[in-house]
């Protein structure tokens, strides 16, 4: 395990990683004011934003987009996909959604051409 901050770069398992972000998205009244980093893999092949909607500032092939959390609205996820304009987007951060809620989120996000839901255990190449 290594501590990183936005702007750091390192290699892991043969992948080039650039650290992005800075602060966790606000839940309420400026809190939590916590560090949050995202990870840009291989110059935009994949982007994991952590608990934020920090755009990486480069073209992204695959975006992992948070779909639920105490710090967000569904519109935030839709806006984030629109801001990043990835080739493909897959939902993350959905563990607190029951099936009905997950169906509603996927219905909305499915209207964005890049988005596709991956069920637990499902993979893509």
Image (cartoon, rainbow, N blue to C red):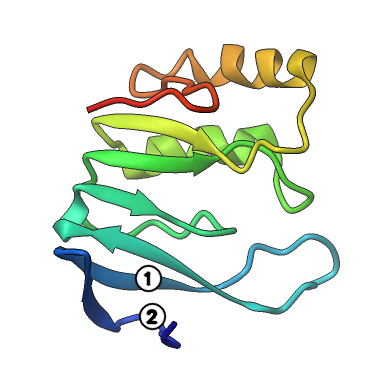
In which image quadrant can residue 92 be found?
top right
Per the image, label 2 sits on a secondary structure element best described as loop
Q: Considering only order in the chain, which callout, 1 or 2, is on the residue closer to the N terminus?
A: 2
Q: Residue furthest right?
A: 29
Left or right position of 80 against 66: left
Viewer-nearest residue: 122 or 60 = 122
Mark linked to residue 45: none
From the image, which quarter does the C terminus lie in? top left
x and y percentages locating residue 25 in the rendered image: 65, 62
x and y percentages locating residue 33 in the rendered image: 72, 78
Mark linked to residue 20: 1
Per the image, label 1 sits on a secondary structure element best described as strand
CA separation in Å, label 2 and label 1: 5 Å
Q: Residue at x 70, y 46 (%)?
A: 72
Q: Which residue is mark 2?
A: 6
Label 2 neighbour load within 10 Å: few <14, some 14-19, many 20+: some
Classify 1 as above or below 67: below
Q: Residue at x 78, y 60 (%)?
A: 27
Viewer-nearest residue: 14 or 47 = 14
Q: Would you say the residues marked 2 and 1 are in contact, meaning their CB atoms lie under 8 Å apart?
A: yes
From the image, which quarter does the N terminus lie in? bottom left
x and y percentages locating residue 4 in the rendered image: 41, 85
Total marks placed: 2
x and y percentages locating residue 52 in the rendered image: 56, 58
Classify 39 as above or below 59: below
In which image quadrant can residue 108 be found?
top right
Q: Residue at x 42, y 20 (%)?
A: 116
């Amino acid at each position: 395990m290594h501590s990183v901050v936005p702007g750091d770069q390192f290699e892991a398992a043969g992948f080039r990683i650039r650290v992005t972000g800075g602060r966790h998205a606000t839940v309420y009244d400026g809190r939590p004011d916590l560090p949050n980093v995202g990870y840009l893999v291989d110059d935009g092949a994949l982007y994991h934003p952590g608990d934020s909607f920090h755009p990486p500032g480069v073209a992204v092939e695959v975006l992992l987009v948070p779909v639920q959390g105490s710090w967000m609205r569904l519109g935030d996820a839709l806006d984030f996909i629109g801001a990043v304009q990835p080739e493909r987007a897959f939902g993350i951060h959905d563990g607190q959604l029951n099936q009905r809620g997950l169906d509603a989120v996927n219905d909305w996000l499915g209207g964005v051409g890049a988005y596709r839901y991956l069920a637990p255990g499902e993979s893509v190449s």
